[in-house]
Structures are given as structure tokens and as C-alpha cells.
Amino acid sequence: VGLACHNYESTYQVFPPAFYVELELAGGVPTRRVAYNWGTAILPYLEQDNLAKQYDFNTWFWNPTNATAANQVVKIYLCPSS
């Protein structure tokens, strides 16, 4: 995970955000909502590129379009004792 974060930093010159939120407003009404965390951002650097491609980075993580990707278990994020 640490190496994946450093590879992300090498690509973007910044470490992955703990949590990224973006709102676009039109007349005070949200027209675009984006939200994801560091674990999602580094998926391509964990050899999980196919999972990252399933995820729509242009919407919230709880949007139904992200349900399949969000429900996948990424084993590297699990504690070995579990």
C-alpha cells in the first residue's frame, strides 16, 4: 500500500487525498457530485486496474453505478489476522 501511494505521488506529484469531495453548484443546487478516498485512488497502483475501471470517479461512491466496484473486497486492505 505504501509503494502504491508513492507510485501515485510519482504520477501526480501529490499523495492521494484522504478523502476527495467536489461539488459543482448551479444556482445553489448541486449539479455534479464527486467523492472517493485514497483507497480508491491507488487501485491502479495495486494491480487493481480492472476494478478502478469499473468505478465511476465522476460521481459519489454510493451512487448505484459504483455498487459493483464498491462491493468488491480488495484483499490487500484486509488485516492478515482476519
Image (cartoon, rainbow, N blue to C red):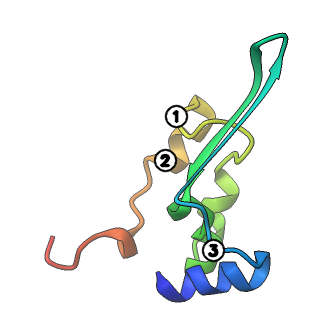
Q: Secondary structure at mark 2?
A: helix
Circles 1 and 2, Cβ within 8 Å, touching? The answer is yes
Q: Quadrant of residue 51?
A: bottom right
Question: Where's residue 73, x and y in %?
Answer: 39, 59
Q: Secondary structure at mark 3?
A: loop
* Neighbour tally class for label 1: few under 14, some 14-19, many 20 plus, Cα within 10 Å: few
Tell me what residue is drawn at x 80 percent, y 22 percent. Answer: 25
Instruction: Specify the label residue 70 is tagged with.
Output: 2
How far, Cα to Cα, is label 1 from label 2? Answer: 8 Å
| N-term-proximal mark, 1 vs 2 | 1
Per the image, the residue denoted by label 3 is 15
Left or right for 13, reference 75: right
Q: Nearer the viewer, mark 1 or mark 3?
A: 3
50 relative to 37, above or below: below
Q: Three-letter amino acid code at disc 3?
A: Phe
* Neighbour tally class for label 3: few under 14, some 14-19, many 20 plus, Cα within 10 Å: some
Q: Three-letter amino acid code at disc 2?
A: Ala
Q: Nearer the viewer, residue 15 or 69?
A: 15
